[in-house]
Amino acid sequence: MIVEKRNNNVTLQAPALTFAALLFMTLSWAPLACADSPEMEVQVENAEDCAVDSIDETTLSDRDCSETGADEDTTDLPANEASDEKDEGSVEEKEEQKNVAPASCETTEQTPAPLYVLDLLDAQRRALADNPSIAAGAERVEQVRQMVSQARSMYYPQIDLNYTYTFSWLPSNYTDSVNAYLDQSEDMLREWRKDQILYSTITRQPSLRNRRAIRSWYRSTQDLIEDARENIESPVENTTMNMTVGLLLFDGFAREFINAQARYGYGEAKAAYREGQRILLDAVAQAYYAAQFAREQIEIGKSDVAFYERLHKEALARREVGRGATSHVLSFETLLYAARASLLRSERDYDMARIVLAMLLGIPEGRLDDRFALAPLEEETPETMTLPDCDAMLSLAFAFRPDMEQSELGLKRASAAVKQQYAQYAPMVAAVGMLQTANVNDTGLTTDRIATTVGINASLNLFSGGRRRAGVIGAKHAKREAELRITETEQKIVSDVNQALTDLKIAQEALALQREASGCVEKNRDLVELEYNAGKAMLVSLSQAQRDFIQAQGMLAQARVNLQRTWQALHAATGTNLAVLNQEIAGELQPDTPKDAMPSVD
C-alpha cells in the first residue's frame, strides 16, 4: 500500500485490497455514520416553499436514478478496473475537495450568547407596553373620559365676566351743527368785545378793576369755546363691564341623558381599547410561533446538511479505496448543495419572522437583534391534548370578549340618545343673575355705578319645522342598529369559538398521527442507510428515505406549532388571552401552569 499526500489530502493507493480489509472498513464506517447523525427538530414551510422543494426533489430524484444505473455497473468492475477509475477521477476529486467546504467551517462559527430569552408571555407584555397602536388607543380613551367631565359640568352654575373698552366718534351731522353754533358764539363774543372797547374809550367807563374782570371773563369764555370744539372732534371713551351667573334648573332631563351617553361612550372606548389589546395579543402569539416555526426549519436544514456532508465524506472515502463511484460522490454533493440552499431559505424566513415580531413588540430598531433568543417550543401535555367543552368556551367568550361588552354599551348609549331627543319638547328654566356698569369717558369702577339684576329665564320652543321629530326618529334607528350589532357580535363570537375548537381538534389529532408517522419514517431511513452502506440498497433509495424523513419531521414540527397556535387562537376567540396574562383566570385555562409562575401586567 502506497501513501501519498496531495493538496493536504492523504490518499491510499491499494491496487489489490483483500475482501476482508474492505469489509472491515465498510463496517467501521457504518456505526460512525449512525453516531454522527444529530437529533432534529423540524418545521414545515409554507405552501409555496413546499411546492418549490417538491420540484427540486423530483429533479434530484430523476438525476439520482440516472446516476445509480451507472453506479451499479461500476460496482461490478474488478478491483484493477476500479483502481483505474479512481486514478482517472483523482483530478476531479481534488476540485471537489476544494469546492466543498468541510462541515466544521459552518459549525465552528462563534455567535454571541443572547442576553434575553423571550417567551410568549414576555413578548405579549412588551407588545402591550411598547406598541404605538395601544398607546394611541389609550389616548383615545382619555379623550372620551374628558367628555364625561364636560357633560357633568352642566350641573354646575355658569359664570361669565365681560369687559368692554371702546372709543366712539360722533357723527358729522351732529358735530357740524355744534361747530356752527360755536362759530356763531365766537363771532358774537368778538363783536361784543369790540363794542365794549369802544364804549370804554369814549366814556372812560367802567373802572379799571371792572375792565380787568371783563377781560378775564372774555378769555375764559374763549377757552370754553375752544374746549367744546376739541371735545366734539375727539372720540368718546366708553367702559362697560358685566358679570352674569346662570344656573339651569330644568331642561326635560336632557342633562341626565347626555351624562348617560358620555358614561356609556367612555365604557365603549375602554372596551374598544381592550379589544385592540386582545387582537394584538393574538397577533403577537401567531408571529411568535411563526418565528419558532422558522427556527425549527433552520434546525431541519442543519441536520439535512450534516447528513449529506457525512454521506459525501463516506463516498469520497469509498472512492479512495476503490469501492465507490464518482457518480455517487457527485450525487451526494448535489444533494448537499440543495440542502444548503434550503437552509438559506429557512434562515431568510426566520429573519423575516423576527422582523414582524419586532414590529408588533414596538421595538424602535424594527428587528430582534442577537440579544433576544426565543424560548424553546413547548411540548404537548395531557391538558393541551384534551379538547375543551364547547359550551364552557362559549360562556367564557360571552363573559370576557371586549367587543361583546362594547356592543352592549353601544345599545345603552343609543337608548339614552332617544330619551335626550324627547327632552327637547320640554321647557327650559334657568336662574339668572347679572352685575353691570357702564361709564363714558371714565374708566373707574365704583360700587355706586353697578346695576344688579336677578331673574328667572324660561323658554319653550313651539315650532321647529320638524327638527325635533326628525331627531327622535333618527335616534330610534340608531338604537335599532345597536341591537342588530349585538346580534352580529354574538354570531361572530359563536363562529370564532367553533372555528377555534375545530382547528384545535384537528391539530391534536394531527400531532398524534405525526408522532407515529415520524418514528416509522425515521426507522425506515436508518434501515435504508444501513442497507446502502452494506451495498444492498441503491443511492436513490437512500436519498428518497432522507427526503421522507425530513418531510415527516417537518410535518411533526408543523403539528407541534399548530397545536400551540390553535390554543392561542382559542384564547383569543374566548377573549381570555388578556385575562390569562393578567392572572384573572389562569388556573382555569392552564391547570399545568401555577398562577405564581405567570407574570402580570400592570
Image (tube, rainbow, N blue to C red):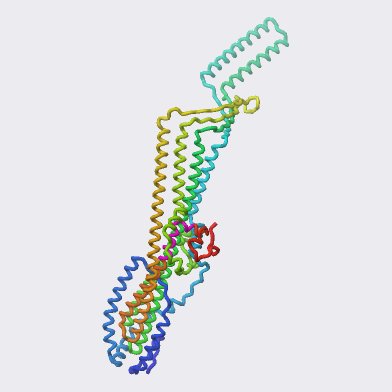
**Residue 341 found in image quarter:** bottom left
Residue 352 drawn at (x, y percent): 42, 64
**Residue 88 found in image quarter:** bottom left
Q: Is residue 306 placed above or below 423 in the rendered structure?
A: below
Q: Quadrant of the C terminus?
A: bottom right
Relative to the observer, which residue lies in front, 188 or 514?
514
Q: Would you say 440 lies left or right of 524 here?
A: right
Residue 574 lies in magenta, yes or no?
Answer: yes
Residue 257 lies in magenta, yes or no?
Answer: no
Relative to the observer, which residue lies in front, 217 or 146?
146
Relative to the observer, which residue lies in front, 505 or 298?
505
Residue 391 drawn at (x, y percent): 42, 57
Which residue shows up at 38% across the image and 79% down it?
A: 309
Residue 417 drawn at (x, y percent): 45, 39
How many numbered circles does the render carry?
A: 0
Q: Would you say 264 lies left or right of 60 here?
A: right
**Residue 393 found in image quarter:** bottom left
Q: Is residue 275 visible?
A: no
Which residue shows up at 50% across the image and 33% down it?
A: 252
Q: Which residues are magenta?
A: 562-578
Q: Would you say 188 lies left or right of 570 here?
A: right
Q: Is residue 144 visible?
A: yes
Residue 469 drawn at (x, y percent): 41, 33
Residue projecting furthest to the top: 203
Q: Quadrant of the N terminus?
A: bottom left
Relative to the observer, which residue lies in front, 450 or 128?
128
Q: Report the magenta stretch's main SS.
A: helix
Q: Is residue 199 placed above or below 178 in the rendered structure?
A: above
